[in-house]
């Protein structure tokens, strides 16, 4: 995948599908990295990213439109659940949670376990497909 765009940069579905909860000490007011102003208390020992503990979740740090160009506004300071969440197909492993989030937004699954590589690849902007990837009519 070194020559193609990471599919996460054109997705963002996980950021608008799951509650992002983590140990309270990951927030910067307790010595962690996550900006505390973007979190809210969940319990005595847990916090969550604002916007993710509602019926229609969307993390406050998500920038862009799901399925379009997206990014995390605190990528270098994101909490552990975000750091540990792998896109489906990473290291050849199916992540049903990733594919479930994508399906909610009408996006195709990234990986099918019977295939050796990722099912969907985002083409490198400006690059043309090799001849063997171009389907001829008829």
Image (cartoon, grey):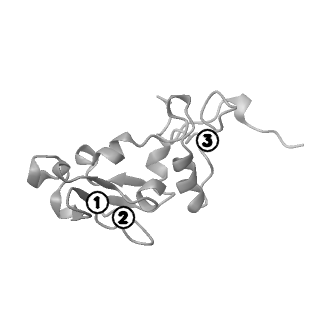
Foreground mark, 3 or 1, reads 1
Measured in 3D between alpha carbons, the distance from the residue under mark 3 to the one under mark 1, in whole angstroms, is 31 Å
133 relative position to 94: left or right: right
Query: Going 35% across and 59% down the picture, which residue do you hit?
Result: 62
Tag count: 3
Instruction: Identify the residue at image location x=10%, y=51%.
Output: 30
Cα distance in 3D space between marks 3 and 2: 27 Å
Q: Earlier in the sequence, mark 3 or mark 1?
A: 1
Q: Residue 64 location in percent, x, y?
A: 39, 61
Residue 84 pos. (x, y %) = 37, 40
Residue 76 in the image, given as x and y percentages of width and height? 24, 43
Question: Between 116 and 134, which is closer to the camera in this rendering?
Answer: 116
Residue position marked by numbered label 1 in the rendering: 48
Please name the residue that numbered disc 3 is placed on.
120
Asked if marks 1 and 2 touch (Cβ < 8 Å), the reply is yes
Secondary structure of the residue carrying tag 3 is loop
Looking at the picture, does residue 41 appear above or below residue 115?
below
Q: Residue at x 57, y 46 (%)?
A: 96
Label 2 neighbour load within 10 Å: few <14, some 14-19, many 20+: many
| Residue, disc 2 | 52
Residue 52 found in image quarter: bottom left
Q: Nearer the viewer, residue 22 or 98?
A: 22
Label 1 neighbourhood size at 10 Å, few (<14), some (14-19), many (20+)?
A: many
Which of the 4 image quarters holds residue 103? bottom right
Badge 2 marks a residue whose secondary structure is loop
């Amino acid at each position: 995948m070194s020559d193609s765009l990471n599919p996460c940069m054109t997705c963002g579905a996980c950021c608008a599908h799951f509650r992002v909860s983590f140990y309270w000490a990951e927030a910067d007011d307790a010595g962690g990295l996550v900006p505390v102003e973007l979190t809210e208390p969940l319990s005595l020992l847990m916090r969550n990213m604002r916007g993710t503990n509602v019926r229609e979740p969307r993390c406050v740090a998500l920038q862009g439109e799901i399925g379009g160009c997206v990014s995390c506004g605190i990528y270098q300071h994101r909490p552990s659940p975000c750091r540990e969440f792998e896109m489906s197909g990473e290291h050849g492993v199916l992540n049903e949670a990733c594919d479930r989030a994508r399906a909610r937004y009408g996006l195709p699954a990234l990986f099918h376990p019977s295939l050796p590589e990722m099912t969907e690849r985002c083409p490198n902007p400006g690059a043309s497909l090799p001849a063997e990837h171009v389907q001829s009519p008829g």
